[in-house]
Image (spheres, rainbow, N blue to C red):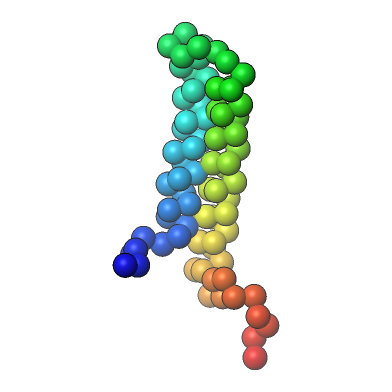
Amino acid sequence: MMSSIPIWTKLWITGGFLVLLGAGLPLLMILQILPSTFLLAFISFAASNIGVVFGYIGMTTYVRVHRGGPPFDDRPPS
């Protein structure tokens, strides 16, 4: 069954969650609720960066679809 939620909305939600995770994990490490390990620091760094990339891809997809361009078809117009 196809979802009625557009792909850019899914990317924005996923990206936003990852950015919040990337900001929340260091906060919990500073407050000493979670232990400060290299793995957790790397996961928070990666989550933040991947979230920004997902948000950017979602934004560009939204703009491309709403400007009237082909959403995922790069063939030249005939």
Most distant residue in the top direction? 32
Measuring from the top left, give residue 75's x and y in whole percent.
Answer: 65, 80
Measuring from the top left, give residue 63's x and y in whole percent.
Answer: 54, 63
In the rendered view of the protein, which quadrant contains the C terminus?
bottom right
In the displayed structure, would residue 14 be above or below residue 8?
A: above
In the rendered view of the protein, which quadrant contains the N terminus?
bottom left
Measuring from the top left, give residue 31's x and y in whole percent.
Answer: 46, 10
Q: Is residue 1 left or right of residue 61?
A: left
Residue 67 visible to an observer of this rendering? no
Residue 56 visible to an observer of this rendering? yes
Residue located at (55% from left, 13% from top): 36
Residue located at (51% from left, 69% from top): 65
Residue located at (45% from left, 60% from top): 7
Residue located at (50% from left, 12% from top): 35
Closest to the observer, 66 or 4: 4
Q: Is residue 78 left or right of residue 47?
A: right
Residue 70 position by quadrant: bottom right
In the displayed structure, would residue 2 be above or below residue 53?
A: below
In the displayed structure, would residue 73 be above or below residue 32?
A: below
Closest to the observer, 58 or 37: 37
